Amino acid sequence: MKWMQMYLVGYFIFLAGLFAALWKLGVIERAGTPWTVIGVVIAVGLGVMFSVANSGKKETVEVEKS
């Protein structure tokens, strides 16, 4: 598995735990379904952005023209 995939797996496990804690505390019930879905979409988007930003080494590729 690449590091990006491992990061995403860990991030989704974190989100599942956070979602379970908020559900158990009753926060999700008070916020309602639309806001819960919006929050999950934003959290997943942030996870993808962070994993892509932290994946692999950054280097400049030079292409020679013949």
Image (cartoon, helix red, strand yellow):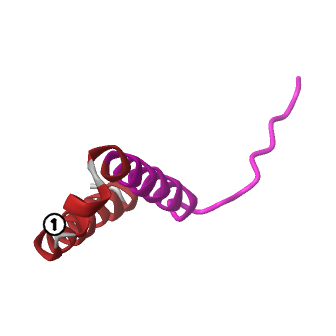
Report if residue 63 lies within the magenta region.
yes
**Can you tell which quarter of the image residue 21 is in?**
bottom left
Question: On the picture, is 44 further left or further right than 20?
Answer: right
Q: Is residue 51 above or below residue 18?
A: above
Question: On the picture, is 46 further left or further right than 35?
Answer: right
Report if residue 45 lies within the magenta region.
yes
What residue is drawn where x is 34% and y is 56%?
2
What residue is drawn where x is 25% and y is 62%?
30
Q: Position of residue 25 (x, y in %)?
A: 16, 76
Quarter holding the C terminus is: top right
Question: On the picture, is 11 further left or further right than 52?
Answer: left
Q: Position of residue 31 (x, y in %)?
A: 31, 59
What residue is drawn where x is 57% and y is 59%?
53
Q: Residues within 10 Å of mark 1 (few under 14, many from 20)?
A: few
Query: Which contiguous range is marked in magenta?
Result: 37-66
- The single residue placed furthest to the front in the displayed view is 30
Quarter holding the N terminus is: bottom left
Q: Amino acid at mark 1?
A: Trp
Q: Secondary structure at mark 1?
A: helix
Question: On the picture, is 47 further left or further right than 1?
Answer: right
> Which residue occupies the foreground of this view, 62 or 33?
33
> Which residue occupies the foreground of this view, 18 or 58?
18
Residue occupied by mark 1: 23
Q: Is residue 63 above or below residue 59?
A: above
Q: Position of residue 4 (x, y in %)?
A: 40, 57
> Which residue occupies the foreground of this view, 55 or 51?
51
